[in-house]
Image (cartoon, rainbow, N blue to C red):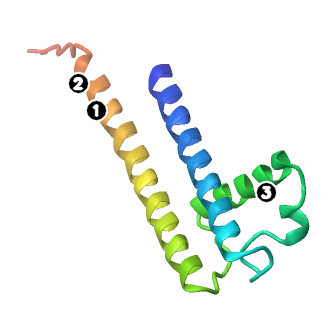
Amino acid sequence: MITLSFDLVRTNAHEQHWVTCAYHLVCVYEGCASSGWVLSCSIMAQPPRSVYLHSLFWAFSSLTGDIRQPETEVEIVFSILIMLLGAFTFCTLIGTVCSHIHHTTHAQPQSHTHSR
């Protein structure tokens, strides 16, 4: 079970990182402060660590269903893709945990006592 938990956390961390980087690229493409959806120019001018943290916050928020209202077509398409990724991740998580529980419970020997 610990290995399963570590694998799920590691996979989620990789996913969050890639969504963070993709969001930053969309912000650069759209231009800072072109809408309320992208990072502001003052944030984009900060050191990379700060920009990454703001983008990571957006990634965590969006994958949990709290997405700011996109305004341009690029923002709308990107938001839809991220919502689909979040749904897929949730389904994978639930399926993996259920499968692990199923295999764990069926792997244990069951002792049946018959009373006559």
113 left or right of 74 in image: left
* Quadrant in the picture for the C terminus: top left
**Relative to 23, does residue 6 appear above or below in the rendering?**
above
Residue holding disc 2: 106
**Relative to 10, does residue 32 appear above or below in the rendering?**
below
The 10 Å Cα crowd at callout 3, few under 14, some 14 to 19, many 20 or more, is some
Gap between marks 1 and 2 measured at Cα = 6 Å
Quarter of the rendering containing residue 9? top right
Q: Nearer the viewer, mark 3 or mark 2?
A: 3
Type of amino acid at the residue the image marks with label 3 = His
Q: Nearer the viewer, residue 113 or 97?
A: 97
Residue holding disc 1: 102
Where disc 3 sits, the SS reads helix
Query: Are the residues at dot 1 and dot 3 in contact (C-beta closer than 8 Å)?
Result: no
Give residue 80's position: percent from left, percent from top.
Answer: 49, 73
Quarter of the rendering containing residue 46? bottom right
Q: Earlier in the sequence, mark 3 or mark 2?
A: 3
Where disc 1 sits, the SS reads helix
42 left or right of 13 in image: right
